[in-house]
Image (cartoon, rainbow, N blue to C red):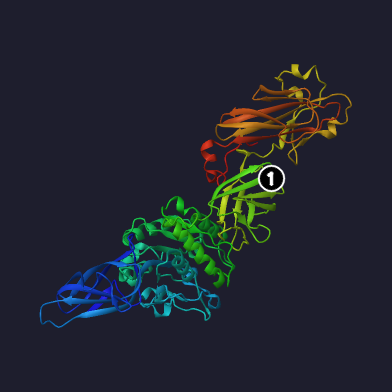
Amino acid sequence: MIIQTGLCDGMVLQRTRDNTCDTAVAGTCAGAGRLVARVRRNGRIVPGFGARPIGHAARGRLEGRLRGLPAGGPYDIELALAGAPGAAPERAVIRNVRVGDLWILGGQSNMEGIGRLEDAAKPDPGVRAFYMNDVWAVARDPLHNLSQATDAIHHELGTARRPGIGTGPGVAFGQAMAQASGVPQGLIACAHGGSSMAQWDPALKRKGGGSLYGALLRRFRKNGGRVAGVVWYQGCSDTAPAQAALYTRRMRRLVRASRRDLNDPRLPWAIVQIAGVYNKGWNSAGWNSVQDQQRRLPETIPHCAVVPAIDLAFDDGIHISGKDQQRLGRRLAQAMRVLRGDRRAGRPPIALRSVRCANGRIVVTYNNVMGRLQTAGRPTGFLLADPHPASIIYRAELKGNRVILYPSVLETQRQSVSLYYGYGLAPYCNITDSADRSLPAMTWVNVEYQRYVMSPFVQTWQVSRLADPAGPLEDLAFPRRRKALGFSRRTFAGWFADLHPELSRHAQDKLVFCAARIACPERMKVDLCLAYDGPVKVWLDGRERLCDPKGTNPASQDKALVPASLAAGRHEILVALVSNDGKAWGVGCRFRRRIPATLRRRPQAWGAVPLPQPAG
């Protein structure tokens, strides 16, 4: 009798909801008849398993299901055929079997484990691993013994590993799960360094051990066809722009296929958000794109948690250190416990709630913070980009679940100011919560400035000759005879149309007109934002919209706001300014467009493609 799937020496069987095993057993035999199981623990028969029927054998094959064995162990399981009288006895003994939770470890090198072995966790007999040579033993790093792998794909992809390395997050994950659950834990090693989403394509499963996904399925079936979940670290090999664009779609397809092929439509996935890279040749935009797609995977993949790693230390240019791999393993365990409904586990991984601007500060609020946000030193990792990275944040404060950012210049005149945490390939990020869980890396989260986006200031004006006022400003009518005013085209260097050189030469009041033409690419609601430092009257498309006969210094930006609805096409602004006995200097004008409510609820929907604005 040879048992091919379902039972192996030293293994961990996956428990069911009632805390017992239910595993499919298959193999070969010479005889036929009823298949029975006799189970011992510490040399004594386990009640109910003296000679328990579990299946049948015929035509050289045996099949059965071992059910009801309580969580714990270790157990010695004897399978035998109750055949015809006088038939040669057939039996097999599987020793040192435990019942608990079984996990698939998948992805690429940081799951395979490339941290220094000197920092590896000490083995725990209650945490076992199914190594790549199909042997069960106590889990110790390195878990992925690629050079001895049974499946051909691992030899095709390469098995070289530098001496002295091999620590990954798996052992620490298993030990944390064992401590929390009180039952044995089993780890099925399936990762391979450098592997891409294309190499993990579920469509390749027909190749069996000749593909990564096919090898995963074979190892799953060999261990009884039931697992508790998947722990995954992959994405670095998909950061080239063309591959990054497909990442979310491929990840969704992989999770969907695994839940179908592993017979669990709610199979939980704990996924690591890729950290950083200190090597040359990587595409930073693609890297940040994959990080942000991973951050948002729980929005489209149910029963999925994404665990940030952006704050962890490295042992080389791309691999997390052995010491911090243990921190990562504990984070993955905590997230997996939440996914599985353990009420003692705390909250899901930290997630972005909102980014808002208020009183010259940027307030970033997070969900799921346990305790409070904290750091050992100055909070670091945020950067503003508009649209190219140029950090202008000079201070960050942590208050509960919020980060308060103080920018040196709040560039509200720009259309697409974006906030990053962990920008680029090798950022330094150091903010965690009280449970040692990192903020997620994020990219292209557009800061919402008071629910508006601001256009550039008008810099090109038609400026009239100076004239004497003909009466009170309130009585000034819209000028119909434009040529008589002697307009000339002038472009000003800054945001302010500075007419002080000519206005200051006259002690008595002078009147000057400034006209600007703008184009609207679409219908929009705006506020005409005006700056002025003397008595002023404003017309928009020939209609009077503002009259301030008491206008005076200073000419602050956005001194007056005039609501307007602009149709698509061209429009004209005409401003009449009185020199205020030489004290007035000029005018300024820009627009702020109200962001539609539907876009305010989805801040990433505007900014990557700037919201259209009136333009000169």
Q: Which residue is mark 1?
A: 410
Tell me where residue 94 appears, x and y as whole percent. Answer: 29, 78
Work out whether residue 183 or residue 608 is closer to the camera in this orientation and state it. Answer: 183
Give the class, few, some or many, for how many residues have Cα within 10 Å of label 1's Cα (few <14, many ≥20).
Answer: some
Using the rendered image of the protein, determine whether residue 321 is visible from the camera's viewpoint. no
Q: Quadrant of the N terminus?
A: bottom left
Q: Quadrant of the C terminus?
A: top right
**Residue at 58% of width from left, 58% of height from top?**
434
Q: Is residue 591 positioned above or below 207 on the image?
A: above
Q: Is residue 96 positioned above or below 448 on the image?
A: below
**Residue at 73% of width from left, 39% of height from top?**
495
Residue 582 falls in image quadrant: top right
Indicate left or right for 325 with 490 as reference.
left
Q: Is disc 1 placed on a helix, strand or loop? A: loop
Tell me where residue 487 appears, x and y as whole percent. Answer: 75, 28
Residue 472 falls in image quadrant: top right
Q: Is residue 323 positioned above or below 481 on the image?
A: below
Given the image, on which type of amino acid does mark 1 rest? Leu
Using the rendered image of the protein, determine whether residue 181 is visible from the camera's viewpoint. yes
Tell me where residue 399 appears, x and y as whole percent. Answer: 64, 50
Work out whether residue 167 or residue 88 is closer to the camera in this orientation and state it. Answer: 88
